[in-house]
Amino acid sequence: MIQFSNAKINIGLNIIARRPDGYHDLETVFYPIKINDVLEVIEADKLSFESSGLEIPGRLEDNLCIRGYHLLKKDHDVPPVKIHLHKNIPIGAGLGGGSSNAAFFIKLMNANFELGLSADQMEDYARQLGADCAFFIRNRPVFAFEKGDEFEDIKLDLSAYKIVLVMPDEHVSTAEAYRGVKPAPVRESLYDQIKTPLTAWRGQIKNDFEGHIFRDHPVIRGVKAELYEHGAIYASMSGSGASVFGIFENTPNLGGLEEFNQVFYNV
Ligand SMILES: C[C@](O)(CO)[C@H](O)COP(=O)(O)OP(=O)(O)OC[C@H]1O[C@@H](n2ccc(N)nc2=O)[C@H](O)[C@@H]1O
Ligand SMILES: Nc1ncnc2c1ncn2[C@@H]1O[C@H](COP(=O)(O)OP(=O)(O)OP(=O)(O)O)[C@@H](O)[C@H]1O
């Protein structure tokens, strides 16, 4: 069985408090976008994983699909599978590519082998693999809170706009991003801010990682500034970076930027 495994952007990201378990309480809005990996899972004699497209760093046993397999295997009688992943989603981009793969892997296994898992049960499995993973079980616009793995569905439809995503040639690790931020309570919740007209977002919806990441990576700051110069109604770094998205009325021509970056139009 084959499945597209799409990316997300974070619209707003408030880091509220450090938790006793070392993680952070936060609030963010997750919005699915149309940059896709392709995931194939086939029953086989032994467990194997191969990938094509972008190179995936790290050890095989740490790959989130393999970790997802072992997690399900603990509770369910699943056969060995051959996993093929075609990787298009930029890595270390704040687009949740690996997290998406994990969630879609769980969904594929559930369908393939009739595990009978409910959406809530799949979310519980996904949550164990990473904070971002659970979102991709729902894969529809949500307000997320606590570790970013508890959700409330929201009505948010950006399909009338053009979302453009730029991936600069920079790398930011998620753990590094969290270490550099000072948590603080919010004055107004993102849950209310996201309901305001898009034209009001620029003045109020923030990504708390931008402060220190823009200081350490001025190229990323420059990309955001360029998106506004090209007419974005709203622009922001996604998650812990390094990608930056802009929401436009009409598809912009980002001529100069394409020389230095990967640009994805109308995602
Ligand atoms: C930045 C975001 O992408 C925003 O959606 C996520 O918060 C990160 O989610 P993720 O990559 O799935 O994160 P995990 O793999 O669970 O954790 C990676 C590291 O990020 C930090 N982390 C993550 C989530 C969270 N709520 N608090 C944290 O402090 C922890 O240091 C953790 O060791
Ligand atoms: N299936 C996978 N695809 C991509 N990366 C994976 C996968 N499994 C494990 N990883 C590891 O996860 C790390 C980051 O992956 P990912 O692309 O999800 O990060 P990200 O874009 O920063 O996303 P996030 O928004 O979750 O922080 C990689 O360095 C890689 O070692």
Image (cartoon, helix red, strand yellow):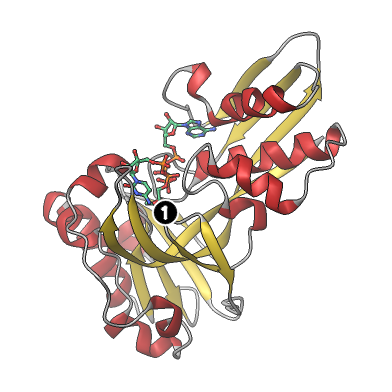
Looking at the rendering, the quadrant in which ligand 2 lies is top left
Quadrant where the C terminus sits is: bottom right
Q: With respect to residue 207, does 161 lie above or below? A: below
Residue at image point 76% right, 16% down = 80
Q: With respect to residue 48, does 107 lie above or below? A: below
Q: Secondary structure at mark 1?
A: loop
Give how far across and how far down residue 74 sits, in percent: 68, 23
Quadrant of res 32: bottom right
Q: How many marks?
A: 1
Q: Nearer the viewer, residue 58 or 229?
A: 58
Residue at image point 25% right, 48% down = 178
Residue at image point 42% right, 66% down = 28
Q: Evaluate whether residue 171 shows in this view.
A: no
Q: Which residue is mark 1?
A: 147
Q: Nearer the viewer, residue 250 or 2?
A: 2
- Residue extending farthest to the top is 45
Residue at image point 76% right, 38% down = 108
Mark 1 CB lies closer than 8 A to ligand 1: yes
Quadrant where the N terminus sits is: top right
